[in-house]
């Protein structure tokens, strides 16, 4: 959908996309049959005419699908390959229509990627999730993922129709939502802020970690939602690091584990939760868009939900941006500054970036008290009980990094991703040698969370939370033998620049 249109998203989508795609063929089919059978008396039975037109459309659709598959097989055979197999829904409805219901239910009610995990059991690690004739290849095979994000990086992009347009209300044209020259520009602007001399200033993380611990202690005798605490800590640390000012989400009353809130605290402003709450709402809304695809306006018919919830975020960001621009103008650094010069020591990221960026939110899950005991022992031996760890000490805490890696393996902050092919290519299975033909213009999705839980890639204890797998012989047997089975921070040229900063922030909180 075009941005800036005065029409509601759903109405615009119906007029521009749905009517030409569905209504016009139905009407045309109905008219053609009416004219063709004008000499028969049954032409006056409008219900019969409508049924005949629908049958005709179904036959046309089926014939088109058959021709499409035939052409794909013919082209694939030239490369001694085959098309990726098309999965079929349980009810075998035309166009895999039942999969739409399953996808929506999965993203709104089930655990993350659970609905895909059920399909993988029946169809294997790579299949074509075709909906109404539109191909979408899905995989959890690390060899294919590596090929997309590293080996053939140049021919795989975000894709305007099925990604950047969907995410534009949230991400604009920033580094997470751009390709080509624009992406390279944002990447070059962002990189200097994640250099080692920028991310080793741990005092910022320590301040917000202390606030988190204080909040936990204030809940003496009450349960604590650690995921909520971790999310707030990450939000406050990230906004301080990126914007130079914290959104202070920790000041708002904490949620109880079952979702209720305590009575408002005296010092908590009524507007304090607006930024983090709006941010979480936007994340959920955009995730839903990615699942329903091009037809997302039908679920936001009268208004862009993401745009509406971005307003409190902009209310916070814009004053900071204005102050940053004024400070830069006073120093004469805003206009004409060479990107390659890099930022000054006291500048914040926002002085170089004009799009909203966000930090991944992680929470540490432990199910065995011995893990916490081992972790505490290592931290105490290396750092002590009160000091803030240095960069070198963080590197020395091997078990701590194993705990973080294991958390990111089972609960990656970005559970899946997608790309769009600009050229055709061949995927060769390292296990079977089967060659799959991947056509130009196809969208491909992959699930990080499912791949990182595969027992054939991680061993029989793949679903167990066990940090020792990163320190014993299993690390060499599985991960080191095939590093692309673990990609929580993506990989290749688009690897997350904030990876080390995120790890450092979590280290301070755990400490």
Image (tube, rainbow, N blue to C red):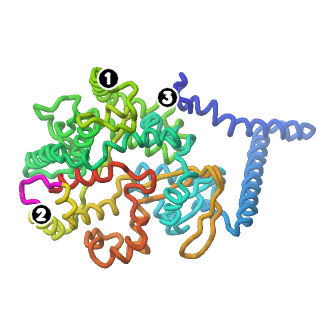
Looking at the rendered structure, which numbered label has been put on residue 302? 3
The residue that label 2 is drawn on is 382
- In the image, which residues are magenta? 383-390
The residue that label 1 is drawn on is 332
Q: Position of residue 83 (x, y in %)?
A: 66, 63
Marks 3 and 2, how far apart in space?
Answer: 57 Å
Q: Position of residue 71 (x, y in %)?
A: 75, 58
First in residue order: circle 1 vs circle 3: 3
Left or right, 401 with reference to 218: right
Marks 1 and 2, how far apart in space?
Answer: 45 Å
Looking at the rendered structure, which numbered label has been put on residue 73? none
Residue toward you, 431 or 228: 431
CB under 8 Å between discs 1 and 3: no
CB under 8 Å between discs 3 and 2: no
Residue toward you, 490 or 276: 490
Residue drawn at x 73%, y 61% is: 75
């Amino acid at each position: 959908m075009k941005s800036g249109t005065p029409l509601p998203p759903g109405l615009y989508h119906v007029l521009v996309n749905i009517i030409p795609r569905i209504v016009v063929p139905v009407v045309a089919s109905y008219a053609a049959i009416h004219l063709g059978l004008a000499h028969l008396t049954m032409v006056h039975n409008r219900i019969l005419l409508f049924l005949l037109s629908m049958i005709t459309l179904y036959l046309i659709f089926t014939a088109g699908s058959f021709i499409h598959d035939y052409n794909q097989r013919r082209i694939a055979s030239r490369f001694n390959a085959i098309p990726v197999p098309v999965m079929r829904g349980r009810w075998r409805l035309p166009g895999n229509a039942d999969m739409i219901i399953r996808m929506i239910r999965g993203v709104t009610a089930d655990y993350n990627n659970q609905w895909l995990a059920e399909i993988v059991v029946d169809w294997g690690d790579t299949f074509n999730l075709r909906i109404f004739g539109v191909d979408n290849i899905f995989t959890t095979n690390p060899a294919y993922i590596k090929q997309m994000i590293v080996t053939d990086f140049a021919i795989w992009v975000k894709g305007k129709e099925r990604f950047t347009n969907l995410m534009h209300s949230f991400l604009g044209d920033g580094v997470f939502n751009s390709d080509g020259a624009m992406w390279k520009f944002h990447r070059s602007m962002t990189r200097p802020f994640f250099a080692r001399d920028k991310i080793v200033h741990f005092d910022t993380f320590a301040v917000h970690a202390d606030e988190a611990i204080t909040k936990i202690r204030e809940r003496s005798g009450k349960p604590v939602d650690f995921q909520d605490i971790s999310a707030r800590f990450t939000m406050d640390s990230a906004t301080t690091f990126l914007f130079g000012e914290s959104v202070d989400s920790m000041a708002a009353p904490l949620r109880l584990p079952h979702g209720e809130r305590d009575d408002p605290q005296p010092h908590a402003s009524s507007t304090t939760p607006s930024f983090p709450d709006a941010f979480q709402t936007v994340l959920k809304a955009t995730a839903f868009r990615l699942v329903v695809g091009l037809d997302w306006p039908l679920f936001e018919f009268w208004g862009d939900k993401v745009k509406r919830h971005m307003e409190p975020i902009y209310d916070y960001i814009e004053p900071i941006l204005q102050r940053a621009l004024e400070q830069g103008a006073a120093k004469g650094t805003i206009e004409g500054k060479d990107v390659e010069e890099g930022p000054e020591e006291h500048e914040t990221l926002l002085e170089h970036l004009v799009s909203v960026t966000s930090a991944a939110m992680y929470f540490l899950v432990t199910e065995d008290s011995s893990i916490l005991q081992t972790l505490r022992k290592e931290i105490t031996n290396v750092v002590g009980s009160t000091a803030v760890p240095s960069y070198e000490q963080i590197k020395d805490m091997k078990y701590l990094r194993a705990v973080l890696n294991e958390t990111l393996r089972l609960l990656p902050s970005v559970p899946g991703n997608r790309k769009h092919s600009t050229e055709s290519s061949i995927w060769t299975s390292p296990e079977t040698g089967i060659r799959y033909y991947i056509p130009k213009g196809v969208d491909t999705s992959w699930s990080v969370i499912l791949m990182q839980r595969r027992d054939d890639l991680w061993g029989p204890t793949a679903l167990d939370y066990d940090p020792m797998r990163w320190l014993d012989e299993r690390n060499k047997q599985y991960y080191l033998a095939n590093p692309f089975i673990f990609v929580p921070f993506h990989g290749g040229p688009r690897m997350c620049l904030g990876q080390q900063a995120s790890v450092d922030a979590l280290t301070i909180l755990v400490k």
